[in-house]
Structure formats: structure tokens, C-alpha cells
Image (cartoon, rainbow, N blue to C red):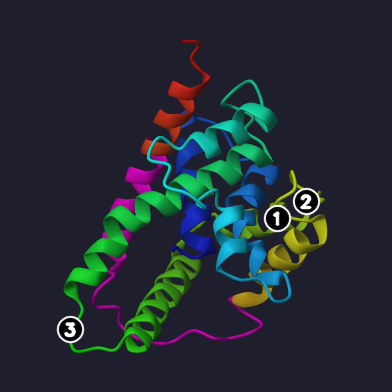
Amino acid sequence: MPCPMVHLAIAIQMHKLLGSNALPDFLLGNIAPDAIHMRPNSGRDDKQRVHASEIQDPRNKRARLLLTKYGSDGFSAMGFAEGYVAHILTDRLWVETVYDSFCKSIPPYLSAQEQRSLYYLETDQIDFNLYHQMPWRSEVWSKLAATQPKDFDTLLTAEEIKQWRDKTLIWFEELKQEPMIEPVHITDEMVRVFIDQAAEEVLRAFKEWKTPE
């Protein structure tokens, strides 16, 4: 799935389309589902649960229920729940577009482990590229640092979300794990197109879901 900088770029683009500024809680929600990585001994079932993907759900009913239960009333002040659901929808769109393209373009002789390693090398590099390039990065980092994580539903604890936020804030500069490669199968241009597309798609879904039937 996309890494934190892609999710944050989509959050910023969503608000750009709305003509507003992203609030700290919305930014935190956009990276929060991956906080499951902070849970000791978490497995595939845990990850599917926090991403509302335990079962096939082409109409995103699980994500919509979360938004209905915890979301705010308007679009100009989106909060944590909206960010959380935006992450879920973004992941699903990524699988259908960028990840599908990656799988079709890699050499067929690679083992499953080699494919996985290549995928994470390229997505990590893409995220570092965004980190170096995005003019809003310092402001977003300040907003994330100011958030006060809370337990979310029965999915994640405040401590798990805090640990993931803190890891994200130090990942790019302090941990210094940039692959230093030139991505071939997932390019900067491909991801820039995806960011614009995902922002529009998530806003469209939010608007449809919040319109009384």
C-alpha cells in the first residue's frame, strides 16, 4: 500500500480542492490505519480489520459506517474519522491502479519475496522523494506533532496511533533509511497522477455518502 507521504499528499490535495487547510486530526487520521504495525505480534487478520477489509466490500460499506458513526457534518473541517476513511479508500484505489500496474510490469521470474522487496524499495523511495519535494512538509509535521491521539472505535489504541505518528515524524531524517534508487515500476509521475485522482475520488465518495438518499 502507499506509504505515509502519499497519504498526506492526498490529504493536502483534498483540502486544496475544497479551498481550505487540512486540520491536524484529519492529517493524523490519514496515516492512522497503519498504526497496526505498532501492535506486537499483529498479523494479517489485524491489518485487514483496521483497514475494514476482512471481507469483500466493493461498495465500501464498512468504511461508510465508520464515517457515519464518527465523521463530522461538513467537508471544510474534516476530522480524524474522515482521514481514517480516506486512508482506507486510498489503499483500495492504489491496489486497483498503481499496485496492479507494478505487478504487470515486473519481471515474471522474480520470486514472491523478491517482488515484495522490490515493491517496498520503490515505494519507500517514492515517499522520500515526496518528503524532499513537498513545500508543505514542515507545516504538516508541526500539525502532526501537535495532535493528541485517542482510541479509535475498537480498532486502534491511542498509544498505537501515537507510536506510529512519532515513527513517521522521525522516519525520513533521523532513521535515514532512504533506498537511494531510481524507481522503475512505480514512478514519481505515476504517483503524482494517483494523488490527484485519489483526492478527487475520496471527496466524491464523501459527498455521495453524506447526501441524504
Tell me the kind of residue under disc 2.
Answer: Thr
Q: Is residue 183 above or below residue 99?
A: below
Q: Residue at x 50, y 68 (%)?
A: 131
The answer to which image quadrant residue 112 occupies is bottom left
Mark identifier at residue 147: 2
Q: Is residue 54 above or below residue 210?
A: below
Does the magenta segment cover residue 86?
no
Among the two numbered marks 1 and 3 on one chain, the one whose residue lies closer to the N terminus: 3
Tell me the kind of residue under disc 3.
Answer: Pro
**Segment colored magenta:** 172-200
Q: Position of residue 9 (x, y in %)?
A: 48, 53
Q: Position of residue 20 (x, y in %)?
A: 55, 32
Circles 2 and 1 in contact, beta carbons < 8 Å: yes
Kindly identify which residue carries mark 1: 144
Among the two numbered marks 2 and 3 on one chain, the one whose residue lies closer to the N terminus: 3
Q: Position of residue 161 (x, y in %)?
A: 73, 59
Q: Residue at x 74, y 43 (%)?
A: 153
Q: Residue furthest top?
A: 213
Q: Secondary structure at mark 1?
A: helix
Q: Residue furthest front?
A: 55
Q: Residue at x 76, y 63 (%)?
A: 160
